[in-house]
Image: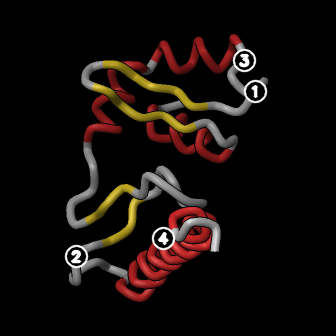
Amino acid sequence: MNPAALLESLQSKGIRLSTKGDRLVIDAPAGFLTPAVKVEIAAFKEELLKLLAQEPKGTERLEQGPYRGFYVATDVHHPDPVLARQALDEAELWRQKRAAWLRKLLLPNLAGGR
């Protein structure tokens, strides 16, 4: 298995890899990070760090919501601008829903309980 195939395999299992400086950060559901998976990751650590450091140009990594960890296009010259726009719209909808929920939760408290 090569590093790209390993990364794809891990992502399909819900295991997310990211970098923090020169460290590899692993976010995995309970029970998914088996000793065999750890050995595979360790074997390709340097290659995985390089692969993860290559953030695609013209994209933005989503840090919140159901698409956390995915990249969406911010460049108008993206190969599939329709899908890119849909992803950005979904991220914006998530932010709007969160803001509405916070307003509903906090405004009564800020208004003195009215």
Closer to the camera: disc 1 or disc 3?
Answer: 1
Q: CA distance from mark 2 to mark 4?
A: 21 Å
Question: Is 60 located above or below residue 94 in the figure?
Answer: above
Q: Quadrant of residue 39?
A: top right
Q: Residue at x 27, y 20 (%)?
A: 22
The vertical placement of 108 against 13, above or below, is below
- Local crowd size for mark 4, using a 10 Å CA cut-off: few (<14), some (14–19), many (≥20): some
Q: CA distance from mark 1 to mark 2?
A: 36 Å
Name which of mark 1 and mark 4 comes first in the sequence: 1
Q: Amino acid at mark 2?
A: Asp
Label annotation for residue 34: 3
Circle nearer the N terminus (2, 4)? 2
Marks 4 and 3, Cα distance to the nearest angstrom?
35 Å
Mark 2: secondary structure: loop
Q: Marks 1/3: CA distance?
A: 10 Å
| Nearer-the-camera pick, 112 or 98 | 112
Q: Residue at x 64, y 31 (%)?
A: 28
Which residue was labeled with disc 4?
95
Q: Whole-percent x and y of residue 101?
A: 61, 70
User: Badge 2, how many Cα within 10 Å: few under 14, some, many 20+?
Assistant: some
Give the labeled residue for mark 2: 75
Q: Residue at x 28, y 64 (%)?
A: 59
Labels 4 and 3: the sequence-earlier one:
3
Residue 77 occupies quadrant: bottom left
* Residue 107 disc label: none
Q: Which residue is mark 1?
A: 30
Q: Position of residue 108 (x, y in %)?
A: 61, 70
Query: Are dots 3 and 2 in contact, CB under 8 Å?
Result: no
